[in-house]
Image (tube, rainbow, N blue to C red):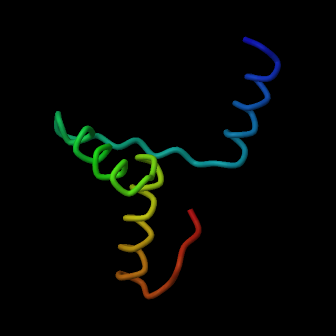
């Protein structure tokens, strides 16, 4: 593994939490298509949905 890759992996581990998401077969493609229609990545699309639901549930904004 290159030093650059090692650095990126260490940086990501220090700065970000990871959450796994399991979906029924075919769901990922549907979400990818919806995200693409909004010119977003799947990650951005999911984060937006989580932020909106969190605000609805708590009344507070969250930075993801």
Quarter location, residue 46: bottom left
Foreground residue, 57 or 46?
46
Give x and y (percent) for residue 5. Answer: 73, 22
Quarter location, residue 38: bottom left
Foreground residue, 22 or 38?
38
User: Hey, which residue is sitting farthest top in the picture?
Assistant: 1
Foreground residue, 32 or 18?
32
Foreground residue, 29 or 59?
29
Question: Does 31 appear above or below 45?
Answer: above
| Residue drawn at the location 42% of the way across and 80% of the way down | 55
Q: In the shown orientation, is residue 57 left or right of residue 25?
A: right
| Residue drawn at the location 36% of the way across and 82% of the way down | 56
Question: Does 26 appear above or below 40?
Answer: above
Quadrant in the picture for the N terminus: top right
User: Hey, which residue is sitting farthest left in the picture?
Assistant: 25
Give x and y (percent) for residue 60. Answer: 50, 84
Quarter location, residue 63: bottom right
Q: In the shown orientation, is residue 63 left or right of residue 52?
A: right
| Residue drawn at the location 54% of the way across and 73% of the way down | 62
User: Hey, which residue is sitting farthest right in the picture?
Assistant: 3
| Residue drawn at the location 25% of the way across and 38% of the way down | 29
């Amino acid at each position: 593994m290159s030093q650059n890759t090692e650095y990126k992996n260490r940086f990501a581990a220090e700065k970000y939490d990871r959450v796994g998401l399991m979906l029924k077969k075919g769901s990922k493609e549907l979400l990818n298509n919806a995200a693409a229609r909004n010119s977003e990545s799947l990650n951005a699309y999911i984060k937006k949905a989580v932020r909106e639901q969190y605000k609805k549930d708590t009344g507070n904004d969250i930075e993801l």
